[in-house]
Image (cartoon, grey):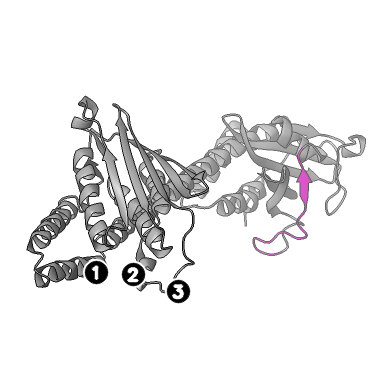
Amino acid sequence: MQQSIPHTAFNNEEFENTLIYFSKSLLGKDSEDDILWDLAQNCIAKLGFEDCVIYLINHKTNSLIQKAAFGPKNKKNEHIYKPVSVKLGEGISGYVAQSGVAEIVNNTSEDSRYIVDDAIRLSEIAVPISSSDYIYGVIDCEHPHKNYFTKQHLRILSAVASICAIKIKNIRNQKTVLEKHKKVLQLKEELVDLKLKALSSQLNPHFVFNALNSIQYFITSEQKKLAVVYLSTFSKLIRFHLKYLGKDAVCLKEEINMIHWYLSLQRLRYSNQFTFDINAPANKHFENAKIPSFILQTLLENSVEHSIFNQHKNQTIDIKFLANDDYINIHITYLHDANCPSKTQYTPEYRKSIMDWQDQIKLLNSVKNYDIKKKITFIKKSDKTNGSIVNLKLPNLTSL
């Protein structure tokens, strides 16, 4: 059983012993609840108080929530009897939580702010739990007799509240760091999964098999020149993906070559159902420019597969690049005839595995803080032509 300190007086040694006792009792306490219950059941009991409630501020509701207690409010271990909440600014404890200034009320019957909890008590002391002008909560103690609490009580409760505030602050900071670290790890895992999905999408078995079948068709139909061109282009595309597998950035000039190879293969594969043009003016900014990998092919794959699925006619893809030291601006215009047949009911299974390029950008912005900007505009140039314009602003990752 804890030895009580008479409320009439306690000397400096007893003051220091109480602080040392509380500081030691906090060792190993890793949660706010453990700290507050330790404060209520051990430290407050050691001071000889009859009733004490410890509040924390809920900033969402702008109120004080009872979190721990000693006395009538604590009839069972670490359980508050009929817990109540107090609005900031209401009652003596709510007023102290708002002002940040501790108060001793010698006669609550003469203080209009006093709020009865479980019973009427005539003395009250309320001390903010605060650190660096940030208020976490309030230690609120009451006594049935008038003029019970002294300046010594105020002094020791203020010191104890400061220790408690520092401990709560450290726990919350540590929790914030751990949550951020956990989020970063989760995003990194998602990024690895993203790269695998992007690679799987771009080197999809169906795409590879169709490419090989096309080569076989050209050979067997005596179109050897086309077979050689197709095989050469396909091998360049494979080498490109193997070279940049696992890398975050790709040289812009090589990416443009890759786009040309990819669209050339798709154009042959789909019997020239679309045409494309790539405009990349040569200047000093293109020489060493780098962009995030695996974005453009995913975007173009989405566009090509969507257009073929919807049986668009007279399709054209126009791609323009502009570069400076900080950003690469990409302007993609896709046009097709306004009148097109109804959608086919045939949906190849592999189309379901194609990544959404917008999901890819969202994840890259979260993980890498690339601040990639995108804008999609749907256009109708005339009664005969529909289409869309995609504007991308990618970071120039020259340093990677």
Looking at the image, residue 62 sits to the left or right of residue 355; the answer is: right
For label 1, the residue is: 205
Looking at the image, residue 124 sits to the left or right of residue 290; the answer is: right
The numbered mark, 1 or 3, whose residue comes first in the sequence reads: 1
Residue 358 inside the magenta-drawn segment: no
Where 200 falls versus 17 (above or below)? Answer: below
Q: Which mark is residue 359?
A: none
Q: Are marks 1 and 2 in contact (CB under 8 Å)?
A: yes
Mark 3 is surrounded, within 10 Å at the Cα level, by few (under 14), some (14 to 19) or many (20 or more) other residues, namely: few
For label 3, the residue is: 345
Looking at the image, which is closer to me, 105 or 17? 105
Label 1 vs label 2: CA separation? 8 Å
Secondary structure beneath label 3: loop
Q: Quadrant of residue 15?
A: top right
Which region of the structure is painted magenta? Answer: 76-88
- The amino acid type of the residue labelled 1 equals Pro
